[in-house]
Amino acid sequence: MNGERQYRLGVLGSGKGSNLAAIADACAAGRVPAEVTLVLSDVPDAGILARGRERGLRAEHLAPGKFRTKLDEEAERRYVAALREAGVDLVVLAGFMRILKGDFLGAFPQRVINIHPSLLPSFPGLEAWRQALEYGVKVTGCTVHLADPGVDTGPILAQQAVPVLDGDTAATLHERIQQAERELYPAVIGALARGEIQVQGRRVTGFRGS
């Protein structure tokens, strides 16, 4: 992070926005040396937009286009243009339910990060907490990683473990993983803003935790 201006975040999400709230509140409290300059959602009434607006953030719906699981080309151009116009240094995916492909990722090389509710590479894809519970693992958690064209396959920046308890249901396990996400994601973003994380291929160094 340089001293000329605050490190700028653009947050994309499709759901309730709990990670956005944690990130924005950590920024406002000075724990993360950054600011959220734009919140975008593919869902017009998504909670993430309400949570952003409650905090005085610019929060907008952008239609995703004709596809169910990804942005179409025109939508992708609109998203990229909005993020560039906001001058974002880092694109933060916070429950954004669209796969981002090469053109979008190429517009922000190694500057798109995602959080996933498992200890990758275990349990990629949807409902990872349920996958972990059904498989019978004793420890799962969450992972912050760089986004790439695959599904949850980018270089791992940091992870936080969450034990699977004997009485866990999918709902109780998911809630504890979400609590861990709200701790880990702001910590990683803070480290990126301070220039503490270095990525060489799949090797990542410099993260010291929260």
Image: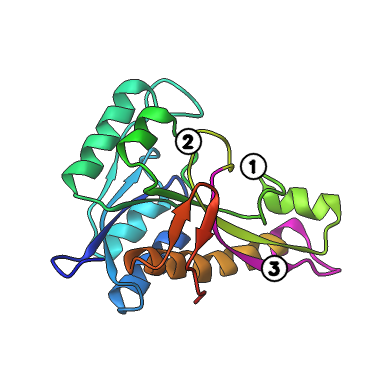
What residue span does the magenta drawing correspond to? Answer: 154-172
The answer to whether residue 193 is above or below residue 59 is: below
Check whether the beta carbons of the residues at disc 1 and disc 2 lie within 8 A of each other.
no
The answer to whether residue 139 is above or below residue 135 is: below
Residue marked by disc 1 = 126
**Image position, residue 96 (x, y; %):** 46, 44
Mark 3 crowdedness (10 Å alpha carbons): few <14, some 14-19, many ≥20? many
- Residue at image position (46%, 61%) is 19
Residue marked by disc 3 = 162
Is 46 magenta? The answer is: no
Element type where label 1 sits in the image: loop
Check whether the beta carbons of the residues at disc 3 and disc 1 lie within 8 A of each other.
no
Circle nearer the N terminus (3, 1): 1
- Residue at image position (41%, 20%) is 66
Residue marked by disc 2 = 98
**Image position, residue 91 (x, y; %):** 35, 49
